[in-house]
Amino acid sequence: MTNTWNDEATVSRRGSDGRGRRSAARTARSGFPFLVAAAALVALMASGRALGQDDDAAALTERSAIVVRGKVVKTNASNEPMVAASASTAVIRITKMYAGSEIAGDQAGRTATVILSRPGSVKVGQEATFFGNPRFMGKTLTIADEGEIASNAADSRAAPSIERRVQARRDRPVVERLASATLVFRGVVETVRPLAAAAAAPGESKPYPTRPSEHDPDWHVAMVKVVKPLRGESGPVVTVVFPASRDIVWFNVPKLKPGQDSVFITHALSPEEAARHRASGLVAFMDKQPAHVIIEPSDVLPPGDEARVRDLLSTAKEVK
Amino acid sequence: MSTPRCRSFATFALIALVALSLRLPAFAADLLVNMTPNSRSGETNQDAEPTIAVDPNDFKRMAGAAFTWDNLTGGPMVTAAAPIFVSTDRGLTWALANIIPSKIGAGFPTGDITLSFSSTLSGAVAHKTSWLYGGTLSSATAGRPMTVLRSQDPFSSTLMTTLDTRTGNVDQPHTNAKTSAAAQDKLYVGFNNGYGCGAPSGRTSTFDLSQDAAAAAPTLTLDVIEARNTACQDGFAQVAAPHSDGTVYAAFLHDWSSSPRLVIVRDDNWGSGATPFAALTDPSDSVAGRYVTTALTLASGTMGQNRLGASNVSIAVDPGNSNRVYVAWGDSNGANSETIHVRRSINRGVDWSNDLLTVTGAMNPQVAIDDIGIVGVLYQSVTGGRWETRLARSNNMDATTFATPGILLAKQSATTPAATYSPYIGDYASLVTAGSNFVGMFCASNYPDKANFMSGVTFHREVDWTAHKLYSDAAHTKVVAPSIDPYFFEINTSICNKTPFFCNICKLKPYLCYPIFDPLWFLKCPMCGIDILVKLDDDYYKQVTVYDSLEKKVGTLQRLPEPVVEKGVAYNYKVSLQPKEGLGYVLKAELAAGKKLPGNFTPPVAVKQTER
């Protein structure tokens, strides 16, 4: 039988082989226990509530890229040719998408196949919220459920909580970058110029190839005036190095422009990165003067995210 | 008394009956499919740089990949798994299966990625499939390491297992798997290891290689296949072409950063010895690696919004004869333009022809050889402001000439949509074979105009061909801007594409004819005869007749009293012939009653010259 928001003890959840859980385990193993704890706490605080009736919805949302409300159209059924119909599959009609529209658009009104967290956990005609991750995207969407919670009158109360948890999931990459940041500040870009390969100290690197690599970062240097420090101490102007390349591996890293007002989450070069980029002259440049790098999409955020970043920083501090 | 209408019906019925009695072969239509599935109709990503793999055990099973995000707009990843395309109906429909390890928040889904099936059934429970291997620049960890991946069941959407990780300045993994007679999966992931002057003596052409990749915990070893020093690095693509007899060729651009030359290396035992890939030396310096070209001027700049000079090396070995190997590459055609070239060797890479095919203003050459020795070349050229994607096939017995410019698959604008990142359509395209057919994947604009595509093109995403618009919804209320999409194609090819003479002999059942020709027979010894040795399953065949390319019957295969064993293959039938210059042969099989072949008639064949 499917559970309700209030039935914490019997919520249907995927077992230990669920991808979401494995992913969390991998994250923890890879040296980010602090980040996992921080993310969890962020989610908790964002909800503004103590642990309670919708904890399971929260936990499921944390592991799920797709959260939809839907009505069960068929059980023991599948719309996806690669997923055999069984007691673990059902076809639902999506009535609302809480999360996942960025994956396949707004699927409201369309049918989807769900691979249930527990065989036989839904009945035809039943309405429920399905938490899961994309398994297949073919003619229709197939969701591998982390869990299902039956809908009832409590929905209206729980929905905002789910949305807050969805935001917490979106915050995860930012939390991760904050954890390893050298500086966090609101600032305005004053100047941008290419990092000349000539910056390399004599004898420090081998001659740069006559042609740059296809994945060459095309390092550029920005001088950024600090408007509001959020974490870490710096002078009034910070030297920030960023990849201006439009190559596939770099194009989603923000490109700085003079006059740009942003929240900056800067980093130091790791030893591995220093080794990789030695020939580009970056290491020599950073040896000569204090400089910070931005190399991930989450390292530069719009000014409107200042309060969000502040909240995330204070949460992380409390976790520490 | 019959009426005229009755008579015409009777005539029609008679024609139909005659046609049926002749059992005319059912020629399947060529296929061109936009691979974006319907549930992703709102997608606007630049899906560039494709790779396709076909399961040798069942051509219905296919996998492909490109730079494809888990989200619709190319933003940072929202899940921890990047998708590949999978099909179980031979490319008619495709679904995205999220199976490549990635990371939430990563700026790219995967870096460069290539896929290859072996012929070993994986034992997966949910779906019968062969092992799928891949090499990718991973977005799952910092520094985008080169990872070697394996999937037991790509059709169950389970994350691929990471077999190996190589860090540093690594680039462009090219994956090729081949199953040996001993049922071991030989896996070759060629990659550039240490670009930017990061490798000792600038020798960056490297294989990450496994001699038994299907094992529970396979061992992968690094083989540097560059035997000469370079000024800094080799070219970014190092591409393998393994043959089932253990011959493995590889092609790369030596000394990319200073004085580039195309080099071919070869190993005769799967690359397993103490000094692998040293079987082929150049006469100029006796060092391993045969130069195919003099120093090249590589293309640079951009063409049709796509960058030039990053890759563009492809190699293929004839599945019926490991002595025959073809290579394709690109060099400069002046500023912002490239020229592609195709050459071949018929003596195991020792000597090379001049260009058999040259196309100016073109890039992304991919060469493949089907199971009857027809050579296909896929390329993309900018003509009249449009990206044209074409497949050119060889059209003579010796596969030295090509029907040019080839079959037009797509001709889309080279200026719209605007590039969002580089590469625009990819540093390579992808071409493989399925029996005698050519199967490939390329990337191009999805602007919907049937006049710009091969006849019969199929879109699964919501489209209005009349209004030339794409939509995200079935009601066609929300317009979606055109973007770069991946396309799948399969071009039917038979012995009729080899030579019209053979087609005359085999037109009713082309799949039961196997052509044989080698110019070396006559060149080596004009007075010698040849013995064609064939391994046949007695249960399947009633008779195999041999015709020459003048359409004259010249013999039938005769059973040998004792099999002749060559390279582990026991040949049990033979025919002895006296070749003439330019003359080829075709083995035409007649099946035993009630027997049906699973694919084309492609028996193991060996040809030995005999003194007369």
Image (cartoon, rainbow, N blue to C red):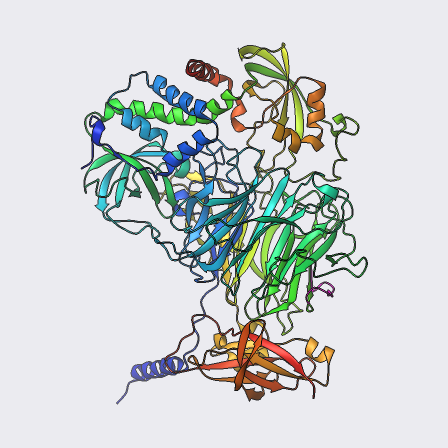
Where residue B568 appears, x then y in whole percent? Answer: 55, 71
Image spot of residue A277 (x, y percent) = 66, 31
Which residue lies at the image location 39% right of the left edge and 39% below the top edge?
Answer: A104
Residue B59 lies, with reference to residue B151, above or below; the image says below
Q: Is residue B359 visible?
A: no
Residue B352 magenta-highlighted: yes
Q: Would residue B126 be seen by someone viewing this image from the given angle?
A: yes
Majority secondary structure of magenta residues: loop
Front residue of this view, candidates A161 and B305: A161
Residue B44 falls left or right of residue A254: left
Which quadrant: the C terminus of chain A?
top left
Task: Answer left or right for B242 relative to B346.
Answer: left
The residue most toward the right is B284
- Which quarter of the image is occupied by the N terminus of chain A? top left
Image x and y of residue A279, in percent: 71, 33
Hey, which quadrant is residue A58 in on the image?
A: top left
- The structure residue drawn at horizontal position 67% and vertical position 39%, both measured from the top left corner, is A213
Residue A147 location in percent, x, y? 28, 35
Q: Does the magenta stretch include residue B497?
A: no
Image mark count: 0
Question: Going by the image, does A42 lie left or right of B185?
Answer: left
Q: In this view, does A266 lie to the left or right of B302?
A: left
Picture quadrant where residue A24 is located: top left
The residue at 70%/86% (across/down) is B611
Start and end of the magenta stretch?
B348-358
* Residue B269, placed above or below residue B386: below
Residue B280, placed above or below residue A42: below
